Image (cartoon, rainbow, N blue to C red):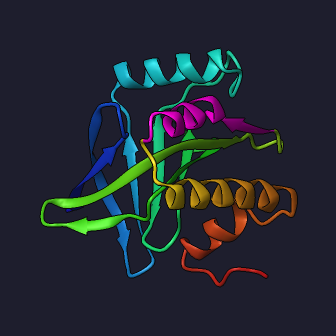
Amino acid sequence: MTRTITVEYIRPGKETSYYEEPLLTENDEYIKTFKRLPDEIADDLTRGLRKNRFITQDERCCCVTKIYFFHEHFDLLLFQDERERVLGYYSDICTPLTRTAGGYHMIDWFLDIWLSPDGTLFELDEDEFEEALSRKLLTESEARIARETFNRLIQEVKDGIYPGTYLELTSGKNPTP
């Protein structure tokens, strides 16, 4: 039987979400979860992805694989269709995942990226990040790390590193340099 874990997802200045997810893998570097979404959630998510033109009108997001890292300032989500084909890759810039008595928690630092399978990259929520800075929801150190991580991932997309190296790392294969 698959163990279900809870991830507390904190958005400074906004609501905190609790995600209950079936755990696939846990080690010292990351946890990996996979969830088939209930129809209502899949429909809402699909509408949002279509509205942002991340997926086509013919595509529907039904599953999400999440990889939360203990030593990285981002996560990696794979949005998938009913056959578990990847519709896109998404990363929140955030604190590394932390183990807690009740599960895990992380803090979102507002910046995000979306990468379509065709290589189209969307840099997201820079306006939310700037607003968070003006409201002092992040420390100077957090803001610096968030910007560095955001820029690093964008460069890694251009260099062909993201998401492939992280997917290889979390699949049990040796990553290619």
Q: Which residues are magenta?
A: 121-136
Residue 135 appears anywhere in the view: yes
Considering depth in this image, is 42 or 159 the residue closer to the camera? 159
114 vs 160, left or right, is left
Above or below for 145 versus 41: below
Q: Is residue 33 above or below residue 60?
A: below
Which percent across, then down, holds residue 177? 79, 82
Q: Nearer the viewer, residue 83 or 12?
A: 12
| Up/down of 159 relative to 41, above or below | below
- When asked about the image quadrant of residue 113, the answer is top right
Q: Residue at x 53, y 22 (%)?
A: 46
Is residue 99 toward the left or the right of residue 77 in the image?
left
Q: Residue 108 or 101: which is nearer the viewer?
A: 108
Quadrant of res 43: top left
- Residue 97: x and y in percent read 38, 64
**Residue drawn 45% across the image and 48% down it:** 138
Inspect the magenta stretch and tell me whether residue 123 lies in it.
yes
